[in-house]
Amino acid sequence: MTYQETTDWLFAQLPNYQLQGSRAIFKNLNNISRFCDYLNQPQSSFPLIHVAGTNGKGSTSHMISSILQTAGFRVGLYTSPHLKDFRERIKINGTPISENEVVEFVETNLDYIKGQQLSFFELTVAMAFVYFAKHHVDIAVIEVGLGGRLDATNVIHPILSVITNIGLDHTSLLGNTLKEIALEKAGIIKPNIPVVIGEYTTETKAVFQNQAEKMNAKILFASEQDIPFYDCDLKGSYQRFNVKTAAAAINELKRLQWEVPEKAMVEGFKKVVSTTQFSGRWQQLSQNPYVYCDVAHNVDGMRVLFEQVKNMSFTHLLVVFGVMKDKDLDGIVSLLPTDASYFCCNADNQRALSSDQLSTYLQERGLEAHSCGSVRAALESAQKVANTDDLILICGSNFVVAEII
């Protein structure tokens, strides 16, 4: 198969959460464990850092990777979902896996993949492990897909675990309270392996402390550490929390005898985008008018996004807005500025809420909303009426942003 045929087959044949939602989630680690056995446990051949959290885990993973790359290490990075190309999920020092290696992995293991009914995510996780092992990375940063305890990435035995924060997202799968969700995220804490916690509440802190005690794991709270300010090229104001979490993680690596000079910390934070090819987080796409995009897609993410918007200088806000059906629409819409114009869209994804439904929902709550159909049509509609001193913001879903950048 060609690369395009291979990825088309993967998306069409394998259970895929990005397209199907909770129906594609398997409730245990049996599949991925068996597949790793079949592949001779590739994830055991290099050190790993495991990163979980409701929001910020992607940014934090890329920050850690950038710092380690700047320090001279060969760093594998596994993240999800991708925005434009499947290969974004699996990188070494910022370079995505080659098309040929994607095809080779699938063709080599095709009979097993078909016979064991692997999910799309399980296959990509295993592919990353094999790729990193084959190319002899010094260390790999592995981002959790969803939750933690039962996420396919949780077959690894890392040298460090990181949990960025806890928010109410994927409640149908992870629980309806912060405590329940924290328990799922805390499932990545391993026996005798240190864990760094980013943001927390009194409720979630107790969950993390209890789990760490059970596992005899050293626990560090980034907000309680004496960490200097680091300038970062990820410019969203919310990134200050992720910077502190990433810095605390690197400091713990230093205590584990990893040599990361302070200069690598400073430079690594300054060039996360260029070093790791990261995108979609408070990313400026153009000016006159300013156009920004951000993949915020849940209540906590949207809250900090619109706090960022308040710091901007503009005359009128125009929002290209689309969401998935399984999100807390009430909670998200309660955060939307009432004086903005909304250009509602639906990404090319079967989980997307239709632009007609979304615009009607917003109109019923007193917001100026227009149904535009596609993401591209929504952006073009916003650009037609925007003045040069206005701000256009594209947000609500990874899939909405993916169709623009």
Image (tube, helix red, strand yellow):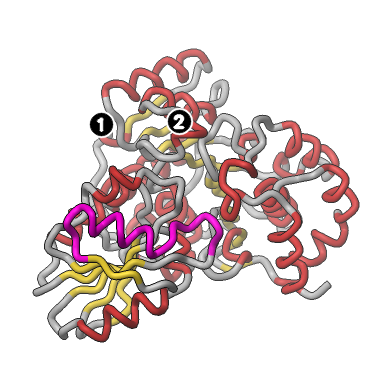
- In the image, residue 239 lies at what x, y percent? 29, 53
Q: Residues within 10 Å of mark 1 (few under 14, many from 20)?
A: few
The single residue placed furthest to the right in the displayed view is: 111
Q: Residue at x 27, y 63 (%)?
A: 235
Is residue 370 one of those drawn in magenta?
A: no
- Does 354 appear in magenta? yes
In this orientation, does residue 139 appear?
no
**Residue 317 in sight:** yes
Horizontal side of 180 relative to 143 (left or right) equals left
Q: Relative to the observer, which residue lies in front, 336 or 27?
A: 336
Kind of residue at badge 2: Val
Q: What residue would you read off at disc 2?
A: 195
Magenta stretch bounds: 349-368
Q: Residue at x 26, y 86 (%)?
A: 384
Q: Tell me which numbered mark, 2 or 1, is placed earlier along the sequence.
A: 2
Q: Looking at numbered disc 1 in the image, what kind of residue is underneath it? A: Glu
Q: Is residue 170 left or right of residue 103?
A: left
Rendered residue at 66%/36% (across/down): 26
Q: Position of residue 318 (x, y in %)?
A: 22, 71
Element at label 1:
helix
- Element marked by disc 2: strand
Instruction: Measure the C-alpha gap from mark 2 to mark 1.
Output: 14 Å
Q: Which mark is residue 286?
A: none
- Is the N terminus in the top left, top right, bottom left or bottom right quadrant? bottom right
Count of residue discs: 2
Q: Nearer the viewer, residue 287 or 76?
A: 287
Residue under label 1, please give it: 224
